[in-house]
Amino acid sequence: MSGDLLNGFIALTNPETFMYLVGGFLMGLVFGAIPGLTATLAIALLLPFTFAMELTNALVMVMAIFMSGIYAGSVTGITVNIPGAASGAITTMEGHVLMKRGEGAKALSMDALASSIGGVLGAAVLMFIAVPMSNFALLFRTPDKFALVFMAVVTVVIVAKGSIWRSLIAVTLGLMVSTVGFDNMVAQGRFDFGSPNLIEGVQLLPAVIGLFAICELLLQGGAPARGVLDAPEFKVRHRDFIPAWADIREIGAWTFIKSSVIGVLIGMLPGGGASMASFVAYAEAKRVSKKPEEYGNGSHEGLAAAEAANNAMCGGAVVPLLTLGIPGDSVTAIIFGVLLIHGLVPGPGLLTNEMATIAPMFAALMVAAVFVFLSVLIFGPYYIWLARMNRAVLYAFIGMIAMVGTFASTFSVFQMWMALGVGIFAWLLRLMKYPLVPMLMGIILGPYLELYLRRALITSNGDVMTLFSSPISIGLYVMTGLFVYFLRYKSPKLA
């Protein structure tokens, strides 16, 4: 294993692969920093073009986008009080106060340092526990796999923001969509209304493009213009972005480490995501802080805790994807598609059989985390201009790329219409405050939930109790109940 990991880092020394790493990192910075655009959208737009990429380059590029995109969501939040993504909301609350006090460079530097530390620790955890978890997953029988996917679906529902009923409806819609098309177990179509186009079902790529690209364009196109041009002046020098040792010592190494661990653990929960990681880490940091009164008024400690958890989540979210075949969040759900495009099926056997292929992913995630801190030293004074780009031209370009990319990957005009239809439907859901990540997870997890349930019932002659017949499955159901209790009813509060 250590040899494969070392070879993964060596693979990044290939000039072409390294350029893909740098290109993905910069792409993630841009998409993460511009309000309304996210790392999810960046990888969704890139997904069709990974067909033509060499596998290592594709994996390296998407992991770099993942790491930098999660970090960059806080950049415009700190500078102009508009977070580039929901994951930057907590950082915005603290960072923009510092910005208005004339400490914008200090806030951005601490933001980048905490993100880099969290990202490195998250990638390290991924490297050390992925293979043991994969070996443990090989012990799972069909009822155990059903219990695992069931736990993932329930977790997706309970960790989503807002009403649990809206989240439940969204994941149910995703599960319903996943049943459309050819039924492999009985070799016939279902819910296709006699259409030869629908017999192949709703493919993952049009669903992703619709949910995260078309929907976002419709939302942004109908939103009132935001006053980013009224942002405060931001004239600083490059050396102002070097964090002060006194501030780092005041925050303490334990805050960085504990917040990173929280981020990794929440990243492992299907549907957890960066927003939840930053929220929980911030709440925990405030609970034990010696200066809780500073939280909400420009706390360096609160900012560092939220950002360390944000980026540590990246490593955690990849663990269930590679070892169990269950995406940890919306970005890894799309990375799931990248792996499938190149013939790699995420699950227990992937790391056992393809560790040498996957190792550059791990290396890219860690190197990209280091790049996060270097990026603020290089680009810090210019970050504010990312929020001043012409939105009309930008959104038109994204719309064109989304539709062309869908056709290029499927060679089907029908799938282009499918992406548009899914996008309009998702837009209506968003207007009614329904979350989209549960729907995407339902589309991805639905086939597995159905497959394992039907297989278990067939092999047991219809005995439902087979689903509760092993210690592993019982343990997973107990964990599901604990997740519901602690994440929905005992979740930490900010105030």
Image (cartoon, grey):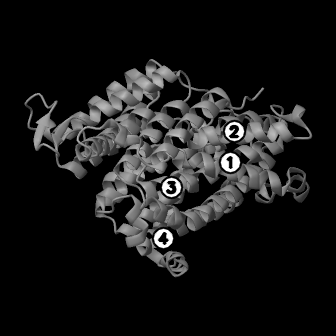
Against 298, is 69 above or below? below
User: In the drawing, what numbered circle is on residue 280?
Assistant: 2
Query: Residue 205: x, y in percent?
Result: 30, 45
Judging depth in this view, the residue of 159 and 404 nearest the camera is 159
Whether residue 79 can be seen here: no
Q: Mark 1: which amino acid?
A: Ile
Whether residue 489 can be seen here: yes
Against 189, is 382 above or below? below
Counting other residues with Cα less than 10 Å from the Cα at mark 2, is it few (<14), some (14-19), or many (20 or more)? many
Q: Mark 2: which amino acid?
A: Val
Judging depth in this view, the residue of 347 and 423 nearest the camera is 347
Q: Are marks 1 and 2 in contact (CB under 8 Å)?
A: yes
The residue tagged with tag 2: helix, strand or loop? helix
Residue denoted by label 4: 360
Q: Residue at x 17, y 38 (%)?
A: 181
Q: Are marks 2 and 4 in contact (CB under 8 Å)?
A: no
Closer to the chain start, of discs 2 and 3, is: 2
Counting other residues with Cα less than 10 Å from the Cα at mark 3, is it few (<14), some (14-19), or many (20 or more)? many
Closer to the chain start, of discs 3 and 1, is: 1
Distance CA(mark 3)–CA(mark 1): 15 Å
Residue denoted by label 1: 262
The residue tagged with tag 1: helix, strand or loop? helix
Distance CA(mark 2)–CA(mark 3): 19 Å
The residue tagged with tag 3: helix, strand or loop? helix
Query: Residue 192: x, y in percent?
Result: 14, 32
Query: Residue 217: x, y in percent?
Result: 41, 32
Side (left or right) of 369 relative to 212: right
Distance CA(mark 1)–CA(mark 4): 25 Å
Query: Residue 330: x, y in percent?
Result: 46, 43
User: In the drawing, what numbered circle is on residue 179?
Assistant: none
Residue denoted by label 3: 318
Q: Residue at x 55, y 79 (%)?
A: 2
